[in-house]
Each structure stands twice: as C-alpha cells, then as structure tokens.
Image (tube, rainbow, N blue to C red):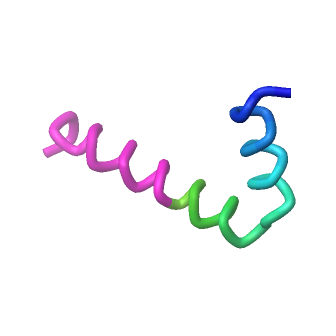
Amino acid sequence: MGPWKLGLRRLRRNKVSLAFGFIFVLLVAVCAAAPLWA
C-alpha cells in the first residue's frame, strides 16, 4: 500500500478535516473563477 492510499484512508476517517478540505477546495475554485463574473 502506497503512502497516498494510506493518507487518503486516514483522511477519510477524519470527518472534520475532510469537511474543511472540501471548503478549502471550494474557496479556491471560487477565487479562480472570480474573473469570469467580475
């Protein structure tokens, strides 16, 4: 089992970090798309 798979499994167990990771990705996506509607 590689380190990536191990890290993903550990991350999936931690629901709080998973939620904040999702919010972070969403925020980055909104910032990247901001020039489209500015």
* Residue 26 within the segment the image draws in magenta: yes
**Image point 53% across, 60% down: which residue?**
23
- The image quadrant of residue 36 is top left
Residue 25, horizontal then vertical, whole percent: 48, 49
**Image point 69% across, 59% down: which residue?**
18
Q: Is residue 24 left or right of residue 37?
A: right
The C terminus is located in which quarter?
top left
**Image point 70% across, 33% down: which residue?**
4
The N terminus is located in which quarter?
top right
* Residue 25 within the segment the image draws in magenta: yes
Considering depth in this image, is 36 or 3 the residue closer to the camera?
Answer: 3
The stretch in magenta equals 24-38
- The image quadrant of residue 17 is bottom right
**Image point 72% across, 34% down: which residue?**
3
Q: Is residue 11 above or below residue 1?
A: below
Outermost residue toward the top in this view: 2
Q: Is residue 24 left or right of residue 35?
A: right
